[in-house]
Amino acid sequence: MPDGSGFDVVQNWHERNFRVVFITGNCENAIKAFRFSASDYLIKPAKIAELVEAVKKVKAELSESNSIDGLKSYLGQLNGNGDPRKTLVVHNSKGFNVLKTDEIIYLEADRYCTNFYLQGKVKISSSRNLKFYIELLPKATFMRVHHSFIVNLNHVNGYNCQEEILLTDNLSCSLSAAHKTQFMRYFKHKK
């Protein structure tokens, strides 16, 4: 698609009161599609019978919730306010944690894993890498500022001449030269 991928469309949708069936020629995107709670995933060239089955599956899912309003209510109970971008499932070696995205201060790469730093000086480690999460987090709130760091822009308290971003709970992380222009531009336009 000229303005991004189907994943970008789903991620940036403000209120998700619909189901998604991804159709693509790249089978490597199947896992990512299910991370976005896709109802189904078809590989091009999709067969008509597969598409019909996918639509039947969506109809069954919707009828289980009795209505779109029922679905919104169900999502609201799961996510706090009905917006699936408000929570993030963080996998670890023992299972997973469900985090509220507004409580995430920053993420740090730790070799092939990721550390999450949350409000209240809580640290959670994940068995997934940083790249995995940058694709799931809301782009309007989270920015990659270094090869090893992603920050929640709502938790930025300042910046100093040591190339450090000052964050909530007296935390800080490095700002790389490669990401400095984008970071500074964001805060210049926040005036």
Image: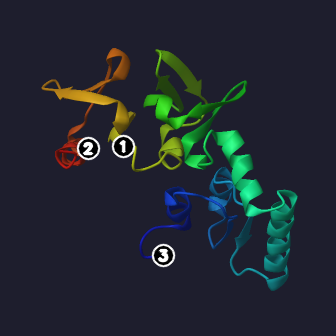
The mark nearer the N terminus, 2 or 1, is 1
Asked if the residue under mark 1 is in contact with the one under mark 2, i.e. CB atoms within 8 Å, the reply is: yes
State the residue position of label 2: 179
Q: Is residue 5 above or below residue 139?
A: below
Q: Position of residue 127 (x, y in %)?
A: 61, 31
Mark 3: which amino acid?
Answer: Met
Image height check: is 103 above or below 187? above
Residue wearing tag 3 = 1
Q: Secondary structure at mark 1?
A: strand
Quadrant assignment, res 172: top left
Q: Which residue is under mark 1?
A: 143
Q: Amino acid at mark 2?
A: His
Residue 33 percent across, percent down from the top left: 65, 58
Residue ID at (71%, 41%): 77
Kindly indicate whether the residue at mark 2 contacts the one at mark 3 (C-beta within 8 angstroms).
no
Which mark is first along the chain, 1 or 3? Answer: 3
Circle 2: element type: helix
Q: Is residue 108 visible?
A: no
Please indicate, yes or no, whether residue 85 appears anywhere in the rendered image: yes
Residue 62 in the figure: left or right of residue 185: right
What is the CA distance from the residue labelled 2 to the residue labelled 1? 9 Å
Position of residue 145 in the picture relative to residue 59 (left or right): left
